[in-house]
Each structure stands twice: as structure tokens, then as C-alpha cells.
Amino acid sequence: MATNGTRKSIRAVNPPVADSVFQSFRLDGKTVIITGGSGGIGYEVARGLAEAGANIAIWYSSSKTAQKQAATIAKDFNVKTATYKVQVENYAEVEEAVASVVKDFGRLDVMIANAGIPSNAGGLDGTVSDWDHVRAVDFDGAYYCARAAGLVFKAQGYGKCIFTASMSGYAANVPQEQSCLQGWCCKFTAQWEKIHLSKSLAVEWAKWGGRVNSVSPGYIDTEISGDCPFEMKEAWYDLTPLRRDADPRELKGVYLYLASDASSYTTGADFAIDGGYTAR
């Protein structure tokens, strides 16, 4: 409140908005980090953003194909790519890798915290060390990536963070105790926490121009679910209104929206891309 009795406006200045919806989705010259970028979802998202003009930094932990995939993206879309071996559960490595990306690419515009790992048991059948490891990668690693990138974003006054969460943040998957995907209790907890971390950071970052959102995929046809029994997959389809799982390429659109200026008024949102599973 101004001292002379007049009210001082707290309204932020609107960003420039392109008349062309197609132009608003372009990412020409932007730099995007994608953790778990050599996996099923991560790689397809990397391709989608590269097609829109983004330069791509693929982070991986143990992939033998990351360099080849990055080279394929660079060739297909005429963008700059690079790969970085990073254990996201180690904050020092994350911070160092973010600095390397900024140095190598000259800028950082988007962090996609997509890395996740599987376990092989439910909440009582798994070990405490399994819990610790899944949580360290799926939740702590996501926070570490957001923090390290967020420090860069805050200094420059802009930047976007996108978390890959899961529909498991909303519902307990059945019939499995996540035995084919992730340890049930830890998976549910980590994804629920990740969605709410996204919302909390969105409120904090809004003060200086940052945006944070999350995507919660349902059942996706990737290597991580490839070994699940036929009967279990049939049960999934029966519980999913669209009665199928998704091709990972069907997720590219929502990530592009959130990474681009098309989503300039979107922050603190979660997008459940699950074929209607959590709508029942």
C-alpha cells in the first residue's frame, strides 16, 4: 500500500503472446535437459521437442544407446545434442551436470525431471534398501534436478521445470502391487509427493518468472512394462476407459505444450495422460 493512501498495483506484466498458435509452440534455439532421456518416454519427448527446434541435453545413468540416440535426434532435426552420464540421486553430480549443460549450450531453458527406476516388490515384500533407492531416484532426484536448474532459472528470471510423475500419485494400481513397475508404497508416495512438489515450487517460482508443472502418465508401452504377464495387462485394459496402453509418442504433445510459450499461463498443474484410468 502506498503511503499517500493510493493503492499500489501488484499486477504482473503480461508476456508477449504470438498470434500464431503454431509459432507459440516453437522452441527454436532453446536448450532442454531431459533426465532419463534415453528411455521410452524420455527419448520420444526429446524427439518431439527437437522437432520443435530445441537443442537437447540427454541425461542417462546406464544406457548403452544414449549417444547413438542423441546423434539420431541431431541428424533428424538439425539441432544440437549432447549426452551426460548423471546419477540424479547425487546432488553434486546434478549441479555439476547443469553447469556443464549451460557451458556447452550457452543457456538453459527447460528441465524435464523424467528419470525413474523400477523395483520388483510391493510395500511389505520389498526391502528397506529398495525403498530408499527408488525414493532417492524418483523423488530426491527430481527435487535435485529442479533445485539445480532452478538456481540458473532464478538468476536469469525465466525457466520451466516439468516433472514426470505418474497416475499412481492419484490411484493405487490394481491388480498388481506394482510388481512389474515400481514398489507400490514407495512408488505411490514418491509420485504423490512429486505432484505436490511441483505445485509448491510453482507458487515459489512464480515470483520471479519461473513455471513448474507435472505430467502423470498411465500405462505406457515401454520396456519397463514389457515383461508383465498377458493376464495382468488385460486387467489394466479392462480398468482403462480407452481399453489400451499408450504409445510413448502420444505424450510428446503435452510436454511440448509445457516446454513452450503456448503454456505461458500454466503453472502448478498436473496432466494425467492415462486413458481415463483415474477418471473412473
Image (tube, helix red, strand yellow):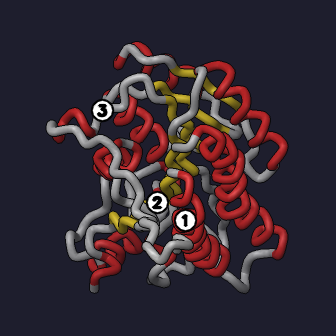
Q: Residue at x 55, y 59 (%)?
A: 207
Q: Earlier in the sequence, mark 1 or mark 2?
A: 1
The amino acid beneath tag 3 is Arg
- Image coordinates of residue 96 in percent, x first then y, are 79, 35
Q: Are marks 2 and 3 in contact (CB under 8 Å)?
A: no
Q: Earlier in the sequence, mark 3 or mark 1?
A: 3
Which part of the image, by quadrant, shows the C terminus? bottom left
Q: Earlier in the sequence, mark 2 or mark 3?
A: 3
Closer to the camera, 50 or 36?
Answer: 50
Q: Are marks 1 and 2 in contact (CB under 8 Å)?
A: yes
**Height in image: 30 above or below 267?**
above
The amino acid beneath tag 2 is Asn
The residue identified by callout 2 is 213
92 relative position to 77: left or right: right
- Image coordinates of residue 240 in percent, x first then y, are 28, 75
The residue identified by callout 3 is 26
Q: Distance from label 3 to label 1 (Cα)? A: 24 Å
1 relative position to 269: left or right: right
Label 3 Cα crowd, 10 Å radius (few <14 / some 14-19 / many 20+): many
Determine the secondary structure under disc 3. Answer: loop
Label 1 Cα crowd, 10 Å radius (few <14 / some 14-19 / many 20+): many
The residue identified by callout 1 is 198
Determine the secondary structure under disc 2. Answer: strand
The quadrant where residue 49 appears: top left
